[in-house]
Image: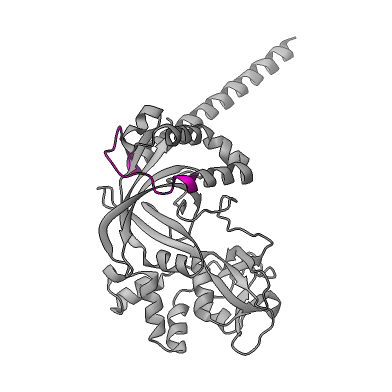
Amino acid sequence: MKKKIIITVVFFSLFFCALKTYAYATINQGQQYKKKLIKNFTKTKKINIEEKITNSELFLVQVKKIKKYSPFLYLKNELIYKKILNWLKNNSRIDELNQFGINLFQMKGTDNYGNVKLTGYYTPIVQARKIKKNDFKYPIYSMPYHFNKNEPLPKRKDIYNGALDKKYILAYSNSLIDNFIMEIQGSAFIDYGNNIKPTFFSYAGKNGWPYKAIGQILINRGDIQKKNMSMQAIKNWFKKHTKKEIQDLLEENQSFVFFKETQKKQVYGASSVPLIAQTSVAVDPSIIKKGSVILLKVPLLDQNGLFINKYEIRLVVALDVGGAIKGQHFDMYEGIGKKAAVSAGFYNHYGYAWVLNNN
């Protein structure tokens, strides 16, 4: 009998200990999240914006895609999605969002005055062939698997010089620059020619070496002014320099991205949901949760990429991430092909952002 009492006491002691630890961990996590909210956002009751949402129909399509391709993500955000859909259906006045049970948390911005960095990305269409031939001589690689975990993968320069086995080559493109842009964008449609439908190559991994932005290198050199920096400006630099000069520049970024061939017909982000142009964004997941809806005030640019002192208001969803997307920064998905490339390439500007929440 005495033995049973001792066992019972020990059991309940351990149980309450575990319960206390769990409660502490839960409260601690809640406090950490609250601190992040205080640090990165300002709760706003109302914003006086008269402009209408420019992409409301695309937003509806994006929500349907989330529901179809990631039911779990949809369920996590279902309440706020339904509130926003109800608002769009019945009103869509931005200054009356709070009347539909929708709270606004403004991003504090890179300067604590609300200025959030906005860049753009897209899905390139890369010309390539399965066999090395003529101009098609620049390898696109799959993720190497024969290296030990403790053995680092080769740096970019070494990969360019043939350090990887040919068995990892998925295809050969006709442009080293296109390969590099494909790495930056994280995926591409590969066009093999002969009227064959393009094949989607998705991100498979990196070599583990540090990423160094070539845009910053060009700014440091004085080749491009900081205020003029954009992907379009980098492409213009490429046009004016030799192949060797271009390769030397690219090699300064030791990081290298690998791909995998897929059967996908649509472009997917990190949330395993097809991306809708001008409606999905890549975010820093340590600040913004996947599936979150953001009201984004986007600067409008002219044909030369210059801000024309006008904005448009988009409803976007956090469905992707990126190695260079940190802090108060949104990377806006602009679509597929050349037109999207121009739009995405010009964006290196600042706008405003409010995360919509039902809490």
Q: Quadrant of residue 17?
A: top right
Can residue 211 be seen in the rendering of this structure? no
Seen at 36% across and 33% down, the residue is: 97
194, above or below 117, in the image: below
* Location of residue 41 in the rendering, given as x and y in whole percent from the top left corner: 34, 41
Q: Quadrant of residue 231?
A: bottom left
In the displayed structure image, the side of residue 327 where residue 171 appears, left or right: right
**41 in magenta:** yes
Can residue 221 be seen in the rendering of this structure? yes
* Location of residue 136 in the rendering, given as x and y in whole percent from the top left corner: 61, 84
Q: Quadrant of the C terminus?
A: top left
Q: Quadrant of the N terminus?
A: top right
357, above or below 239, in the image: above
* Location of residue 185 in the rendering, given as x and y in whole percent from the top left corner: 50, 65
* Residue nearest the viewer, comparing 99 with 29: 99
Q: Quadrant of residue 118?
A: bottom left
**92 in magenta:** no
In the displayed structure image, the side of residue 267 where residue 328 appears, left or right: left
Seen at 43% across and 89% down, the residue is: 242
* Location of residue 96 in the rendering, given as x and y in whole percent from the top left corner: 33, 32
* Residue nearest the viewer, comparing 135 with 16: 135
What are the residue bounds of the magenta stretch?
A: 38-59
Seen at 30% across and 76% down, the residue is: 224
